[in-house]
Image (cartoon, rainbow, N blue to C red):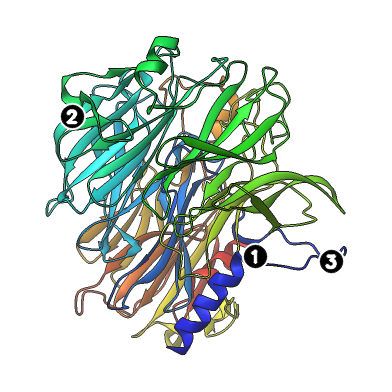
Amino acid sequence: MKSRFILCLLAFLALGPRVIRATDSFSGHEVTPEGAWCWFADPRALHYENPNGTINRTYLGYIDVHGNIKAMQYDFITGRRTEVLIRSYFQPDDHNNPTFLVLPDERVMIFYSRHTDEPCFYYRISREKGDITTLGEEKKIKTSHNTTYPSPFILSEDPEHIYLCWRGIGWHPTIARLTLPDDQDNVQTDWGPYQMIQSTGARPYAKYHSNGKDRILLGYTTGHPDNEMPNFLYFNYINIKEGTLEDINGRTLSHIAEGPWRVNKGERFRKENPLVVVDHPSNERAWLWQVAETTNGKPAIAMVRLNEAKDSHDYYYARWTGSEWKKSFLANAGGHFHQTPNIEKCYSGGMSIDPSNPQTIVASVPVEGTQGRHYEIVKFTVQENGEVTREQLTYNSALNNSRPYVIPGSDRSPLRIGWMYGNYYDWIVSAQRKQGYPTAIHCDYAWPKPTINPEKKRIKAKDLTAKSARLRKGDFTISLTVKPDPQNYGGKLFSMGNLSVEIDRKTWKPIVTIGKQQYVSTNMLATADSWQNHPRGTNGDWYEPTPLQEVTYAVTCEGGVLRTYINGMLDQSIPLEKKQLVYGGTYAYSKGELRVYKRALLSEEVEALVSQE
């Protein structure tokens, strides 16, 4: 009880008042040095606690400029932090961040897809409840059209299905119903996919949120604000029991399976559908950041209005009062937040609504500080009368803080907000802008850092050939740092007893062999860095992989579980059968630095081995 009280107090303080001194600076705490996300695929982070107290974890997902889709899991019970490599060598585009769904059996399902140029979704499911360090093999959901922005839901009125929303058919809001995973983790589409909306714009942008019971809230624009001026903002409910699209009062607008409902910016449409149109500026561009429910169950939207030149962005909080959409001005957000001029000028710093207190919005706002003008995270609270209070959460930052996200389910957790920190040049890595999106992910919680001791219980290099240095039982770590030959990529990395690791020469994937049993990784020892040499765009091509120039591959054995790491990121988690692993024998390994420990290193210690080489 005492620890729970402390966590709740920390959670309160995380969004609570802070006195800022001129000499202070705060830009959050680093989750990962390389990561970014878009804001149209959610939840990009999630906190899950179960009622019996056996699971209390936060998951934050992101993608780096090398095309690695990753997630950080923090376990509040054990205090362990682990960065998981979900998928290497993917399209290096920040639109491809993963999204999370906790299944009824408490396993975690992770969705991801390329940016509108491939007809499928990818997913992986944890083997263990609430533990993404135990991900199973990669699976696909095939579609007849290109996909992006997966947003998955399970609702209490239909707990036997997954409702997946995305930008799909005709670049428009699309929905399908999936079966729950079977014993092989396969899912089937048993309703849809269906296009829900047909706009006069080419690319409506949609955000989703569920009431957890029977409806999905849907907010969307006519099109992209780069292409639409003015640009309208709309709201509907998706009724999953009836398969219908509804207005805010529950009036049926369409049966989704019978075809999309058509929207436009005409005067007649607005008069006939006054409960559908949230915002209809005459000379500005509207875009949205999030849809949520207020405490009385009515919808709320975090939105932005941009002027014709797109160099002035105004943040608004729109909420339904029961008779009208009331909009509260929050702040001017300047222009685009990134460092490249004259592209993507509609990219604001970003906003997020706190799901547990939906009158609270965190936003990225330009502020003059001691280190210049940078985007800082600011908390806004909207009172019932529309009054807005403001509190700065980061301050005097050296670089920008952008795209904040209040983590769903985190109301009792001290880790409440994640955001991107650093410079940003483009949403995709390409020959035009090789830097892409080299941001870090930061958060508002400083977890206790373990003591890193790279020499504790390490077998000295000179003793590795000695009989007394052979591992005979218990926990251990074997780590090898090599520079593979790019002309002859592959072959054995190392072996000990009946355990061996090799790189497959065709796929460049690590294969762990224990006796006669093989465990093939989902991930290649390669990056998507070759995209730096190709044109900017989403043409559907898989460019050639770039082999890693240096690899630190580590294997730890702890409590009957073998874990493998690629350059500090968790790759595979292999539960061992009794007496499956045979100790002893000599170490055989490729040319490189071999480190052997008579203990299992923590993930932070494995990461430290990479930074030391």
Q: Secondary structure at mark 2?
A: strand
Q: Amino acid at mark 3?
A: Arg
Q: Amino acid at mark 1?
A: Gln
Residue at (52, 66) in percent of width and height: 415
Which mark lies nearer to you, 2 or 3?
A: 3
Q: Secondary structure at mark 1?
A: helix
| The quarter of the displayed image where residue 452 is located | bottom right
Q: Can you identify the residue that label 3 sits on?
A: 21
| Labels 1 and 2: the sequence-earlier one | 2
- In this view of the protein, can residue 489 be seen by the observer? no
| The quarter of the displayed image where residue 41 is located | top left
Query: Split into 4 quadrants, where in the image is the N terminus?
Result: bottom left
Q: Are the residues flagged by discs 3 and 1 in contact, CB closer than 8 Å?
A: no
Residue at (31, 31) in percent of width and height: 247
- In this view of the protein, can residue 287 be seen by the observer? yes
Drawn side of residue 279 relative to residue 391, left or right: left
Question: At which x and y percent is residue 469?
Answer: 45, 84
| Labels 3 and 1: the sequence-earlier one | 3
Question: At which x and y percent is residue 429?
Answer: 58, 31
Drawn side of residue 277 relative to residue 457, left or right: left
Alpha carbon distance from label 2 to label 3: 56 Å
Q: Can you identify the residue that label 2 sits on?
A: 192
Q: Can you identify the residue that label 1 sits on?
A: 612
Graded by Cα atoms within 10 Å as few (under 14), some (14 to 19) or many (20 or more), the crowding at tag 1 reads few
